[in-house]
Image (cartoon, rainbow, N blue to C red):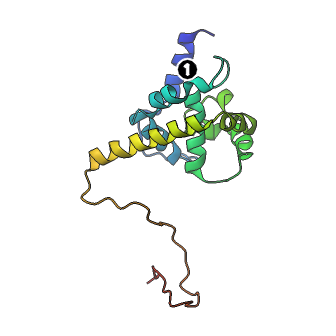
Amino acid sequence: MGKDSKKFRKKELKISGVEMTSERLTSRAGLALFVGYLHQIQIFPMLDRFFGTIRKSKKGVAVTEIFKQVLCFMTDGTSRHVTYFDQLAEDAGYAGAIETDKGDMLSSHRVKRFFKAFSWMRIYLFRRLLQKLFIWRLVIEQPNVIELGIDTMVLDNDDALCRHGVKPTYEVI
């Protein structure tokens, strides 16, 4: 299979619109919108520039594809276990939802090897990328106040006893 035919196949997988349907959709249909957002913000060229050298040969899955699947895995949140990638690799519906060829779906072993390739320098680069994205969004939104370090975890502790004078932050009304 030539280089041009692979590009053509990838273009066929892209979702071009969102419309109503009477057909049953996957429970992870929101991931298609997430992948579309990732393409729209043009994060993949930056990921390739920062982390493309992790890949030692042209064989196998591209680094940007690995990042896309890992980000979708984290966004989905169905499982916290890396071994869940083995189940996802068998799910054609999931592969279609995240615009990935079924043959390019990651195994848990491939994900582990990918994370083992992260040196301290690559972690620094990833933090730098996150900082660039954060600043980019700040320029777009231009908020009046930026509050960092907020604990956003919400627990239902309305029926817990008051200990040491601590009151619930949120109450269900």
Q: What element carries label 1?
A: helix
* Numbered label tally: 1
For the N terminus, give its image quadrant. top right
Figure check: 145 above or below 160: above
**Residue 108 drawn above or below residue 1:** below
The three-letter code of the residue at mark 1 reads Arg
> On the rendered structure, is 106 left or right of 23?
right
Q: Along the horizontal axis of the image, is 138 left or right of 97? A: left
Q: Along the line of sight, which residue is nearer the eye, 120 or 146?
A: 120
Left or right of residue 112, residue 168 in this image: left
| Residue ranking furthest to the top | 2
Residue 111, image x, y percentages? 69, 37
Of the pair 137 and 77, the residue shown nearer to us: 137
Residue 56 in the image: above or below residue 109 = above
Q: Position of residue 35 (x, y in %)?
A: 49, 39
Say which residue appears at 72% left-offset and 46% top-offset.
84
Is residue 19 visible to us here? no
In this rendered view, identify the residue nearer to me: 19 or 87.
87
- Residue behind mark 1: 9
Residue at 52%, 39% (x, y): give it. Answer: 124
In which quadrant of the rendered image does the C terminus lie?
Answer: bottom left
What residue lies at 45% left-to-right and 80% top-to-bottom?
A: 169
Residue in view at x 45 percent, y 39 percent: 128
Q: In which quarter of the image is residue 39?
A: top left
Find the residue positioned furthest to the front: 120
Between 116 and 98, the residue placed more toward the observer is 116
Quadrant hosting residue 94: top right
Q: Where is residue 43 in the image (x, y as percent from the top left)?
A: 44, 34
Q: Position of residue 89 (x, y in %)?
A: 70, 37
